[in-house]
Amino acid sequence: MIISVASGKGGTGKTSVAVNMALSIANVQLLDCDVEEPNAHLLLHPKISHEEPVYTLIPNLNEELCDHCGKCANFCQYNAIFASSEKVLIFPELCHGCGGCILICPKKALTEGKHRIGTLKRGHIGDSELVYGELEVGEPMAVPLIREVKKCIDKSRNVILDAPPGTSCPVIETVKGSDFCILVTEPTPFGLHDLKIAVQVLKDMKIPSGVVVNRAGIGNGKVYKYCKEEDIPILLEIPYQRRIAELYSEGVPFSQEMPEWKEKFRTLFNEVRRRAGK
Amino acid sequence: MKQITVLSGKGGTGKTTITASFAVLAKRAVVADCDVDAPDLHMLLHPEIVETQEFKGSKLAFIDEAKCIKCGLCREKCKFNAITENFTIDPFSCEGCGVCTIVCPTNAITLTERVSGHAYISKTKYGFMAHAMLSPSEANSGKLVTLVRQNAKILAEKENCNLVIIDGPPGIGCPVIASVTGVDAGLVVTEPTMSGIHDLKRALQLLGHFNVQPFVCVNMYDINKDNTERIESFCKENSIEVAGKIPFNPKVVEAMVNGKTIMEYSPECNVTYEIKRVWKNISKALESKS
């Protein structure tokens, strides 16, 4: 089973939920798909056993063959190629790696090259596996790296995907193909506003979802009202407690110090499994 | 005209709370909400929309069933696995590159424009605001950020404002890069947690990469004072100015629930006081830049 953990608003506790759930069940593979700011490893301290660079496909230009016809630049939807009558410039950061320019060049002046966008890391914590990506600073495109992280999915395990914040392409790429998505929110106006957008995304993608309310007790009751009206199940509430916040600040998953929470996260997992029909 | 971006790396550290406060404190500024997939600033500043623009940021392939001979070439050449078994387009995977349109032997595939959001120009109590909303599950937030920034710049010139304050999205990827390129200063809002510190360092590297003058502000600094000290000494070692340390105060969430900035909701509280100090430090530094 593949469970994703997403939120809309940042900082609501996605990684906390993903990590504490991972620590409460057996046979887990956790994939941190927030490749811009991966944090799960800071809480889990895995022993890294494998590291590899990740590249995207970019065009390489052979100047001698190029006759500056400009068809490549004209074709590129991402403005990654600039062509004038004397020069062709390639901007690897803008290239999506579709390979269209290589196909369209009549002189075969463009060939497949590669551009490093980040690093893929795999490690272990006991019998659980953590996989994560680290985007190079200055590289704009997270999606190809998320794709590489997701290629490591081992379907024989309980797979947990920790998504980045927001609701655009990196989030779509992460939650795509999951059996269920846990949406972590906080009971504040910002939390609710962004939750609504995330709920719409999951509806569009036809992925069943449920809500975990983190920092319960702050803000107001509107998140609960909304979930009730929209018939979205509230799977778990984590109260706002200074102790939980302090443990998080120290990089300690709170279920390790507050073992009563392990049972709650196991219940959460079983409930998700039931709802996903797995 | 000067531009400053409030960013964070990690989400939920308090960017929007601080940007909204700056909007109140700044005289003659245009505010831009560049978190286009989860914008929140409007809930504190209550903009009145003056103008709406359609955003056509990306394209989507379309297969004409009548012309398709199901040869499979498009599926073979598509790098994004966007063509399904039944020869339809998966809109969540298609990046609108157009490779399928050139390999199709029967010209059955065309690219269609998709409206993937809206950009707005609005008025608030404190001046003009440029913002946007990316439609749920759409791509290309970086391009929409660029549009919001263009709108903000045009507004600032027209209204004779000398400052644009940008509320950035979390992360360090394309919409963040689009929010920080060419600005005069970047304020990284962090929190004293292990994740906050890790993400702060990457956000600072990003500002360095694009030659933007960095400032740091530690929010909820008293949650973990040891970590706050770590942040301060890291900044000192790297000659980065810590513009202020904001204490934890439940009034911040209360203000949000009431749809107000903390400046308006609790003008005398310790958070308001400290944000004013941050603002003073940054505006002084901006003024001294020619």
Image: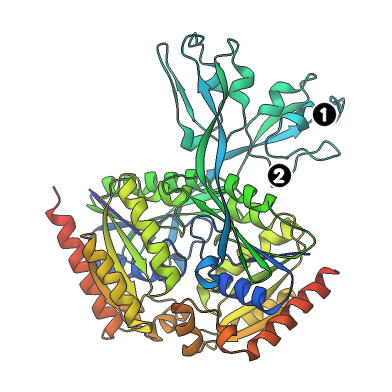
Q: What residue is at 51 percent from the left and 53 percent from the top? A: A134
Can residue A45 be seen here? The reply is: yes
- Host chain of mark 1: B
Residue A175 place in picture, x, y as percent: 68, 58
Q: What residue is at 36 percent from the left and 50 percent from the top? A: B180
Q: Amino acid type of disc 1?
A: Gly
User: Circle 1: is it few (<14), some (14-19), or many (20+) Cα within 10 Å?
Assistant: some
What is the CA distance from the residue labelled 2 to the residue labelled 1?
Answer: 18 Å
Residue B43 place in picture, x, y as percent: 46, 69
Left or right, A241 with respect to B149, comes to right
User: Circle 2: is it few (<14), some (14-19), or many (20+) Cα within 10 Å?
Assistant: some
Instruction: Look at the numbered disc 1 and give the secondary structure of its residue.
Output: loop
Identify the disc placed on residue B26.
none
- Residue assigned mark 1: B72
Can residue B56 be seen here? The reply is: no
Left or right, B166 with respect to A207, comes to left
The relative height of residue A87 versus residue B56 in the rendered view (above or below) is above
- Residue assigned mark 2: B91
- Host chain of mark 2: B
Q: Classify residue A163 by image quadrant.
A: bottom right
Residue A173 place in picture, x, y as percent: 65, 52
Give the total of numbered labels. Answer: 2
